[in-house]
Amino acid sequence: MPTNASAQPQLLSRLNERSVMRVLQAHGPCSRADVSRRMNTSAPTVSKAVASLLRAGLLEEFDVKENGRGRPAKQLRLANETAQVLGLVIDASECRLVKAGIDGVLRQDGEVAFETPKTYERFLRETVHHARALLNPNTVTTLGLGISIPGLIDYRREQGLLSPNVPMTNGRSPSRDLSEQLGVNCVVLQETHALCLAERRYGAAQELDDFGMLDISTGLGLGIVSGGRLLTGHSGLAGEIGHIPIDVNGRLCGCGARGCLETVASDSALAWLVSERVGRRMEIGEILNAVARGELSVEDELELVCKQLSFVLSTVINLFNPASLFIYGRLFELEENLFTRVCDEARRRSLGPSFADCKLVRARGSKRQGAVAGIIEYLTDSLVPDFPIAAAGLFQDNGSLRENAIARR
Ligand SMILES: [Zn+2]
């Protein structure tokens, strides 16, 4: 009978590589000896894993002199001078490209925003144009690009299934097409999953195995991490709370149905109500600016949307019993105590014990951070049943470092 015994050493080295990455992510720069101590693993094993990670460009070495004197000691860190990754956030009105080191820290320089093109062909052209300007082949290796999309994704085919707010991505594969044109690894993530990942890796959910992420920014999305795993459903489409039908005679939703929850309880719902009243299309950013300047008042619309939003919060809390529920959206910027008011209303509507057990928090992560976290996770992905993408089997290929696939530029 065939056995998979020969696969075991490879699995072990992947586990070790992943552990080295985790140590450096958690503790910052360390010597090989520090890594070996923290992993409780022998020095030769750590050296082998480190060598593989250095070859893949995920780590870099630098010299540190003890007290500024003596023979310099070698330290290891996640690559941030020799390598970078890019993140692309596709949103209803704007696309944004950013770059970051393998440590996930976003770089201030080089962030580009452009209006979301109406056609997919134009989107590809413009993205390639802007992304090429961020590739710096002489000094920095670009290891990949993470893409966040507000819509349903078929992760196996790397294909957009349905995005009510950015329909040009429907049936398309930005990760495959951009990978081909830019010559770097690209990976696509549903926006809510990207936000979960950002919060889990770099935000306030680092220690949490049970949390929810409610994204009210572009439509209404929900990511649930339960027992450390992203709840995906049968084919990765779970969490589409935004399309729960709530008013049969309501407004037409981008999904084709009427009166979906996202048409009444989101940043875009507020923008729509305000646009109706003022008689022209206004996006949430423009509304925030106009209100801040005292040129516009949106109290009535805000009241309506927040009432529905508290209903959404209590529904999520009652259904999933999360330890924390993060909420990502901009409308809370409109009034100082608005977030607290919405939470109070949600408390009145929730089951007492479930609400008492749940912390409501404004999300600290961003979609940009999420797109970057997505590609870093992809590059360092291994067979370790960790969080959430590898665990959920969302990526087509569960290989580890994809050393040979990483294009050197
Ligand atoms: Zn809908």
Image (tube, grey):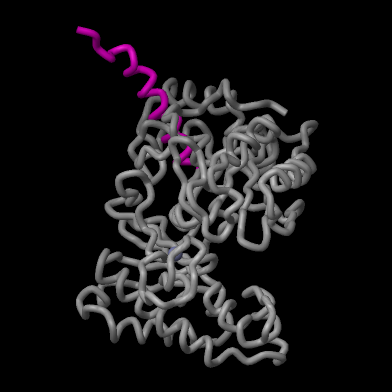
Q: Position of residue 1 (x, y in %)?
A: 19, 7
Q: Is residue 6 left or right of residue 136?
A: left
Q: Position of residue 195 (x, y in %)?
A: 49, 57
- 12 magenta-colored: yes
Q: Is residue 285 left or right of residue 48?
A: right
| Number of marks present in the image shown | 0
Question: On the rendered image, what quadrant is the C terminus found in?
Answer: top right
Q: Position of residue 19 (x, y in %)?
A: 41, 35
Q: Is residue 101 above or below residue 217?
A: above
Ligand 1, what quadrant? bottom left
Give the residue drawn at x 67%, y 90%. 296
Give the residue drawn at x 35%, y 44%. 235
Q: Quadrant of residue 132?
A: top right
Q: Is residue 245 left or right of residue 98?
A: left
Give the residue drawn at x 23%, y 73%. 354
| Depth check, front residue: 369 or 129 | 129
Q: Is residue 210 above or below residue 32?
A: below
**Magenta region, mostly helix, strand or loop?**
helix
The answer to whether any part of residue 115 appears in the image is yes
* Highlighted magenta segment, given as a residue range: 1-24
Q: Residue placed farthest to the top in the image? A: 1
Q: Is residue 121 above or below residue 176?
A: below
Q: Residue placed farthest to the front in the image? A: 249
